[in-house]
């Protein structure tokens, strides 16, 4: 990528870099006053469906923070509309699906995703960004289990009772549902890469609700298929979940070039378990509310724990929280760049 900061691409391939590249999940969003101003004029779906505005939002943190990568601004449920799912994004709550999938009719009603027809605005945003960016662009999608959680629960959940009950009672139908979601997200991610995304991230945000045995039985085969479908693209793929310390070995076996670590997972332990597999993480997002001396201490701790090993992308253990001080986010980037000196 001539003329582009390629630190994150090198790190994703496990190559040495002068310092760990840094970006943040949810680095564009509610904590920025510029984003809040845009939200006064547009709803979240309206931003995503307007390529010029979506590109502007995606570029905000790159210009404001100096991060080493941009991530496409969208929601993991965005492609579900193209599969025939009716849903609303409710402020402060997240995706709400008025007619959850609970039976065979609901599963079979899901249509194959045709990205160029269903989400042309996402692909147009990527094309606009590729003309503007001096850092790599990350495309992304939700993983089949996490999407199935929303589809079956009808929205966010604490206990995942409905999705796990469906999984246990209707195993064959469960696998049919995940097959459809796997095929749809493979098409979605391929289209993003073909439009110009330099890396891809698969968000399995809620898979930590499963035991390792359940992960292996109900999810892992579909993740293996998803990553196999993406491999011919030649684009690095980050595999991320929350609460996944007990699943990390299986997630590595399922696939992905980089394993994302949440802030509950000790970095030295993960590097020992994963061997040469590159990792991403894993500062606690709440540390960004702390005084700068605490932020400096925690950033340095993570760098010391990594001990200079190649293949480390610095990030949070989950997304930036609302009301996070922008200056504190920028300070983390400055600390990482100091490490290069």
Image: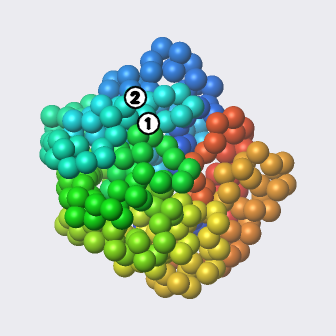
Q: Position of residue 237 (x, y in %)?
A: 36, 63
Looking at the image, is 114 positioned above or below residue 283?
Answer: above
Looking at the image, is 328 positioned above or below residue 265?
Answer: above
Q: What residue would you read off at disc 1?
A: 95
Q: What residue would you read off at disc 2?
A: 88
Callout 2 secondary element? strand
Please tell me which residue lies in front, 228 or 106.
Answer: 106
In the rendered view, how is the structure colored? rainbow
Residue drawn at (59%, 36%) of the image: 64
Residue 20, visible in the rendered structure: yes
Q: Is residue 178 left or right of residue 296?
A: left
Please tell me which residue lies in front, 104 or 326.
Answer: 104
Callout 1 secondary element? strand
Q: Position of residue 163 (x, y in %)?
A: 40, 54
Q: Is residue 79 left or right of residue 310?
A: left
Residue drawn at (64%, 42%) of the image: 321
Q: Mark 2 vs mark 1: which is more N-terminal?
A: 2
- Give the Cα separation between the discs numbered 2 and 1: 6 Å
In which quarter of the view is residue 298 placed?
A: bottom right
Q: Can you say which quadrant of the picture contains the N terminus?
A: bottom left
**Do the residues bearing badges 2 and 1 touch, measured as CB atoms within 8 Å?**
yes
Q: Residues within 10 Å of mark 2 (few under 14, many from 20)?
A: some
Q: Position of residue 16 (x, y in %)?
A: 49, 75
């Amino acid at each position: 990528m001539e003329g582009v900061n390629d630190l994150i691409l090198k790190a994703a391939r496990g190559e040495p870099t002068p310092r760990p590249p840094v970006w943040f999940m949810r680095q564009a969003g509610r904590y920025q006053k510029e984003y809040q101003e845009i939200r006064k004029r547009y709803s979240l779906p309206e931003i995503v469906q307007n390529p010029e505005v979506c590109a502007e939002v995606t570029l905000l943190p790159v210009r404001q923070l100096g991060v080493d990568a941009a991530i496409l601004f969208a929601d993991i449920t965005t492609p579900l509309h193209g599969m025939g799912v009716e849903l609303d994004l409710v402020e402060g709550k997240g995706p709400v699906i008025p007619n959850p999938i609970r039976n065979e009719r609901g599963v079979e009603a899901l249509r194959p995703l045709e990205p160029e027809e269903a989400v042309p605005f996402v692909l147009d945003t990527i094309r606009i960004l590729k003309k503007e960016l001096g850092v790599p662009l990350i495309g992304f999608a939700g993983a089949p289990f996490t999407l199935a959680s929303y589809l079956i629960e009808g929205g966010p959940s604490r206990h995942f009772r409905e999705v796990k009950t469906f999984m246990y009672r209707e195993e064959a139908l469960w696998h049919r549902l995940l097959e459809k979601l796997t095929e749809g997200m493979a098409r979605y991610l391929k289209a993003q890469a073909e439009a110009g995304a330099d890396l891809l991230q698969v968000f399995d945000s809620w898979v930590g609700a499963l035991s390792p045995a359940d992960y292996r039985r109900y999810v892992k085969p579909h993740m293996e298929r998803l990553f196999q479908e993406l491999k011919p693209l030649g684009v690095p793929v980050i595999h991320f979940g929350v609460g996944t310390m007990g699943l990390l070995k299986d997630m590595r076996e399922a696939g992905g070039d980089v394993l994302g670590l949440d802030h509950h997972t000790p970095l030295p332990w993960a590097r020992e378990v994963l061997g040469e597999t590159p990792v991403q993480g894993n500062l606690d997002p709440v540390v960004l509310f702390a005084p700068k001396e605490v932020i400096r201490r925690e950033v340095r701790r993570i760098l010391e724990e990594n001990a200079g090993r190649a293949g480390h992308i610095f990030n949070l253990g989950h997304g930036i929280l609302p009301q996070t001080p922008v200056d504190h986010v920028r300070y983390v980037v400055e600390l990482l760049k100091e490490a290069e000196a």
